[in-house]
Amino acid sequence: MKRFLIITLLGAFLAIGCTTTPAPGTLAKATPESQGMNSTILCRVDSVVFKAIEEGQCPGAVLSVVKNDKIVYLKAYGNKSVVPDTVAMTTETVFDLASVSKCVGTTLSFLQLVENGSIRLTDRVDMYIPDFRPWIDPDTGEKTDIRIIDLLTHSSGIEPYIGVPAYVERFGEATPDSLIKYIATEVRRNFKPTTGYMYSCLNFITLQHILQNITGQTLSDYAQRHVFDALELKNTCYSPTGPTLELCAPTEVQADGLPLVVNVHYPIARIINAGNSVNAGVFSNAEDLSVIAAALMNDGQIHGRRVLGKMTVERMITVPEENSPHIGRALGWDNRSSAAGIRGDLFSRTRTICHTGYTGTSMVVDMDSKTAVILLTNRVHPEDKGGLARTRALVANIVAASVEE
């Protein structure tokens, strides 16, 4: 029965004919050929995504391909849910973005603070979080301060994660103030800033508290007003409510036999930060993320709605020169680190930004060809298993190969 449902959803492809006039907060839809792409090549993505579903890598997926400021391919595959019931995937499905939240929520919000003169990228973290420990050389005792840019590029050396059960036993649940104090004063610094790469959710939790200290707002409130609402997005938020609830895809099945739905999957975000969390917590769908991608490819604005300025976007996608060359991280996004394989083999080596989320989400944005690939899955449903790294790269290659202009 499951296989039958998957196969019948071949017809879920959203027919894209002539360019349409978009509603506020959406992109127009157009044929691939009208935007300089080859639809015969582009359609090859279907077999790659269906193979991943058949192999059990994910129950279903939604793919959006953006070229310039148009959606040229939007399709749902497989199932949104298989526990407790089998429910077909739709293009409107809203996903727990996991670490893609770092890009579309935190990074865009934080760079607005640079634009409005509230911070500098080179500011020391301890300017905003007192007692924030520097790196101390174990041989010489020399201290090196950790800066905001080190957090954004995962070159700070801060430990990647904390053990949530041990933390909760000591500090309790819903204790964000204790968490940042713990990061500031106790969490290990593994290397001198700018010399190494260690992907760390704790980097971004630190950024969250800096933003909140400066603005006097929660991250979720700031991002909602200044990013999501500014772009008039319909189904992008922290802690979904109202009509969005019915659109949310479930994630991992819990001890009670039911999957998480609406509650963020990532333990630090769910248990310690109660959903208002910078490292995860944004829920969104393919069409809303397409708007964000189009805005970035159009110098930070789309259809008169601005989220960042042109020079800010350029800085965001650039790998800092002072960092060790092997790091390869831009501001908040991956560019060419060891984890950037999801961009495939054909998109620009220096001007493509990308990111994945643990739950099975991903974005790839090639600034040169103005092409974006948004592949959303809930691979952790019903169980936390499966891997999509190769699938993402194969899809990116097909999309890149379809670009003719």
Image: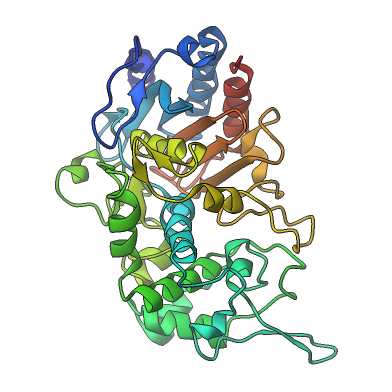
Quadrant showing the N terminus: top left
Residue at x 38%, y 46% (from the top left corner): 306
Name the spot of residue 177 as percent of width and height, x first.
Answer: 38, 82
Name the spot of residue 226 as percent of width and height, x first.
Answer: 32, 56
Q: 78 or 231: which is nearer to us?
A: 231
Q: Is residue 378 visible?
A: no
Quadrant hosting residue 78: top left
Q: Is residue 303 visible?
A: yes
Residue at x 43%, y 75% (from the top left corner): 209
Q: 361 or 114: which is nearer to us?
A: 114
Residue at the farthest top position? 40
Name the spot of residue 393 as percent of width and height, x first.
Answer: 62, 32
Residue at x 45%, y 47% (from the top left corner): 359
Q: How is the image coloured?
A: rainbow
Name the spot of residue 267 as percent of width and height, x first.
Answer: 41, 64
- Answer with left or right where residue 390 lies relative to residue 39: right
Quadrant showing the C terminus: top right
Residue at the farthest left position? 242
Q: Is residue 145 above or below residue 81?
A: below
Q: 176 or 306: which is nearer to us?
A: 306
Residue at x 79%, y 92% (from the top left corner): 141
Q: Is residue 146 above or below residue 203?
A: below
